[in-house]
């Protein structure tokens, strides 16, 4: 795990000081891991949902991670060994301080939506597979509602016998706290429909954002609103006749309207996309639309209305930053005009999958990284201040600082820590342990790892120090 945590004391209006914590962390192991959604918890920490893939079997499992406000991992929950291939696409905290998770599970080679209930410490309480009203499908987004229930949405196929490519509907369902269906609604006739994000609006109804596609035509961004009793209220598409448009995110604005974010491609063979912003009134009628782009591909993933009545956008592009793809935070005014852009990432590839505003006025996002961590990819979580930045003020909690040098090395790596080192494990790229040791000396803060008898290549080293785990990629090269 790579983690850097910082503190910022910012003066507001010259009369008060507010502490803003920022951090950057990775979670994962030798396998491919990724974060798909992030939500803030009542204690200021975060719940991350995503996936972890087994290196040997290739199966993908549900992966849920609980972080505290500093980015430290409190617990992880994996689920899915009996299902072979599954993923957690969304999670939120429940009324009893536990968590509700949705995603998909494969049963008999069919994709099925589920809800998983976890306790506050990550123990499974129940899991429900919703085959009663769906032949197959996937849960994409789940929220808790003001009437103490849950609403989730996703893709659906109501006819299991149909294998037609152009036959995919969407569903939205209301669930009680035991996972029992209160009502469900399936929308979409011919064509392929996607439901990606759901929110509860100030009138206690629900808006879903996604995409609608028909064979041989351009696809449109799509949104619909459902009454709290399940009755459809409106259904609208957005975009132009010669573009490929989609929504990935929706939020309510301070005027009671809606802001949607996604990606638009101008032309059916266009290779480079632009961020696509659409502002509507409460009835889904478009008020304005904007695109944000560069000379390369840039896609919009998340949008939030901020506490200062502006917009923050999570995007990804190969036109900015250091690597192949990097993560962008774009701040605009309420009319969609850019105020600033920040990029986050390393020399390889980073993608963002979910962005939120936090209660301290900052921002947090998750996705995955190939630049940092120990696996092929790892869950990537970043918490920034209100300016979209990681601060460089010393961490007053005195977190363990562990270093490994030199890197690359001929095989002898020196490890130092400001707290006692408890032990280490070294993995090769196949996930096999090639060296491991536990130390009894409670004051050991320096030692060497000798890999001189190992073949040249990349190794992953996990160090336990001060009750924390620190992971590094090292290169052994003669």
Image: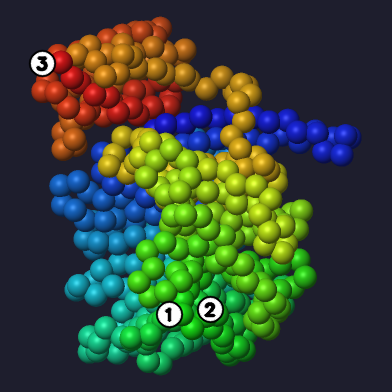
* Contact, mark 1 vs mark 2 (Cβ under 8 Å): yes
Q: CA distance from mark 1 to mark 2?
A: 8 Å
**Lateral position of residue 108 relative to residue 417, left or right:** left
User: Residue 187, percent across and down?
Assistant: 46, 88
The local secondary structure at tag 2 comes to loop
3 vs 1, front mark = 1
Q: Which of the pair 244/173 is nearer the observer?
A: 244
Seen in the picture, residue 291 relative to 1 is either above or below; the reply is below
Point 88% across, 34% down: residue = 14
The local secondary structure at tag 1 comes to loop
**Lateral position of residue 327 relative to residue 20, left or right:** left
Circle 1 is placed at which residue position? 219
**Lateral position of residue 166 relative to residue 144, left or right:** left
**Disc marking residue 239:** 2
Point 68% across, 36% down: residue = 20
The quarter of the picture where residue 28 lies is top left
The local secondary structure at tag 3 comes to loop
Label 2: how many residues lie within 10 Å, few (<14), some (14-19) or many (20+)?
some
Tell me which numbered mark, 3 or 1, is placed earlier along the sequence.
Answer: 1
Circle 3 is placed at which residue position? 453
Q: Is residue 364 visible?
A: yes
User: Residue 275, percent across and down?
Assistant: 53, 62
Q: Quadrant of the N terminus?
A: top left
Q: Is residue 438 visible?
A: no
């Amino acid at each position: 795990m790579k983690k850097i945590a910082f503190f910022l004391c910012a003066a507001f209006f010259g009369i008060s000081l507010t502490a803003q914590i920022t951090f950057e962390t990775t979670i994962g192991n030798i396998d491919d891991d990724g974060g798909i959604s992030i939500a803030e918890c009542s204690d200021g920490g975060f719940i991350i949902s995503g996936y972890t893939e087994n290196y040997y079997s290739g199966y993908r499992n549900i992966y849920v991670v609980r972080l505290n406000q500093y980015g430290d991992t409190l617990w992880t929950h994996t689920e899915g060994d009996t299902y072979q291939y599954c993923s957690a696409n969304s999670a939120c905290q429940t009324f009893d301080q536990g968590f509700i998770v949705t995603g998909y599970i494969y049963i008999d080679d069919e994709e099925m939506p589920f809800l998983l209930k976890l306790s506050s410490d990550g123990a499974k309480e129940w899991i429900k597979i919703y085959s009663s009203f769906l032949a197959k499908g996937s849960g994409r987004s789940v929220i808790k509602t003001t009437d103490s229930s849950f609403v989730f949405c996703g893709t659906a196929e109501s006819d299991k016998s149909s294998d037609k490519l152009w036959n995919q509907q969407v569903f939205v369902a209301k669930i009680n706290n035991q996972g029992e269906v209160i009502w469900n609604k399936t929308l979409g006739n011919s064509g392929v429909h996607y439901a990606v994000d759901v929110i509860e609006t100030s009138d206690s109804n629900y808006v879903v954002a996604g995409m609608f596609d028909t064979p041989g035509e351009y696809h449109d961004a799509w949104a619909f609103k459902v009454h709290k009793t399940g009755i459809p209220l409106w259904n609208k598409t957005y975009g132009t006749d010669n573009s490929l448009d989609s929504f990935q995110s929706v939020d309510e604005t301070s005027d009671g309207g809606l802001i949607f974010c996604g990606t638009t491609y101008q032309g059916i063979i266009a290779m480079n996309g632009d961020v696509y912003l659409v502002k509507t009134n409460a009835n889904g009628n478009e008020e304005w639309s904007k695109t944000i782009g560069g000379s390369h591909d840039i896609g919009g993933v998340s949008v939030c209305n901020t506490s200062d009545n502006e917009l923050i956008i999570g995007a990804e592009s190969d036109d900015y930053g250091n690597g192949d793809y990097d993560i962008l935070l774009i701040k605009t005014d309420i009319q969609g005009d850019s105020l600033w852009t920040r990029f986050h990432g390393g020399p390889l590839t980073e993608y963002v999958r979910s962005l939120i505003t936090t209660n301290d006025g900052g921002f947090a996002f998750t996705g995955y990284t190939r630049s940092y961590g120990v696996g092929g990819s790892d869950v990537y979580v970043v918490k920034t201040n209100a300016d979209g930045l990681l601060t460089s003020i010393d961490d007053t909690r005195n977190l363990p600082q562990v270093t490994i040098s030199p890197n690359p090395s001929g095989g002898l790596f020196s490890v130092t820590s400001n707290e006692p080192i408890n032990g280490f494990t070294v993995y090769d790229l196949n996930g096999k342990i090639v060296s491991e040791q536990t130390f009894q000396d409670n004051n050991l803060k320096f030692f060497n790892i000798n890999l001189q008898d190992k073949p040249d290549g990349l190794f992953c080293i996990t160090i336990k120090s001060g009750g924390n785990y620190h992971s590094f990629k090292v290169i052994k090269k003669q």
